[in-house]
Amino acid sequence: MMASEIRRAPLPIRLLLLLTLGFGLGFATAASAGDYATAISAYRHAHGLPRVRLDSRLSAVALRQAQAMSVTGSVSHSAAGSFEFRVATLRKSRAAENIGAGYLSFSEMLRQWEDSAGHRQNLLMSGARHVGVAFVANSRSPYRKFWAMVITD
């Protein structure tokens, strides 16, 4: 796209281009996303709870949240709109979200979530069966990486 075409593009497309070109979009590959589900499952299993499986729809919701936080530079559950609205189409009876930023590896991010009462409660949500995890790298932000996890029944 030429610069003049970018200026005429609708705002959502401009934001996506900004993410892709300006920030260096980073997200979980299938292999690493599976590793995320495995690590969360191990934590849940150690607490007597069933394992969770990776769900691509949840990963897409998590990615949109991480992208929105990267664009706004904020760690906020409302960066991509209300959580209830973002998961409504999934038709789940239980859903929770963990977010974070500034941790360069998933193991560091997971450790912070485990050490936080509210995040830990989400990781150990009763009835959880599916999870999605994503991150966006933003070298221009002091946080450098924005993480999001969605867990559902």
Image (cartoon, rainbow, N blue to C red):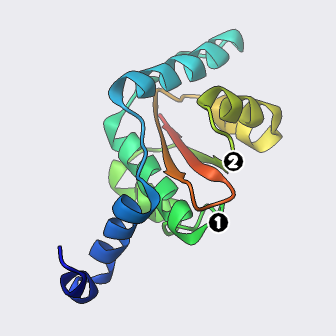
Element on which disc 2 rests:
loop
Q: Position of residue 18 (x, y in %)?
A: 38, 69
Which mark lies nearer to you, 2 or 1? 2
* Residue at image point 47% right, 44% down: 93
Q: Nearer the viewer, residue 52 or 79?
A: 79
Question: What count of labels does the image hold?
Answer: 2
Seen as rendered, the residue at the extreme front is 2
Position above or below: 122 against 12 = above
Instruction: Please tell me in which quadrant of the rendered image residue 69 appears.
Output: bottom right
Three-letter amino acid code at the position of disc 1:
Ser
In this orientation, does residue 125 appear? no
Percent x, y for residue 121?
72, 36
Q: Amino acid at mark 2?
A: Gly
* Residue 58, image quadrant: top left
Q: Residue at x 25, y 81 (%)?
A: 6
Find disc 2 in the rendering and name its residue.
102
Q: Secondary structure at mark 1?
A: loop
* Place of residue 136 in the rendered image (x, y in percent of width and height, measured from the top left): 49, 50
Q: As drawn, is 4 to the left or to the right of 142?
A: left
Task: Give the residue displayed 42% in from the left and 42% down from the top.
Answer: 27
Residue 74 marker: 1
The quarter holding residue 49 reads: top right
Q: Which is nearer the N-term, disc 2 or disc 1?
A: 1
Q: Is residue 39 above or below residue 5?
A: above
Disc 1 residue crowd, few under 14, some 14–19, many 20+, Cα 10 Å: some
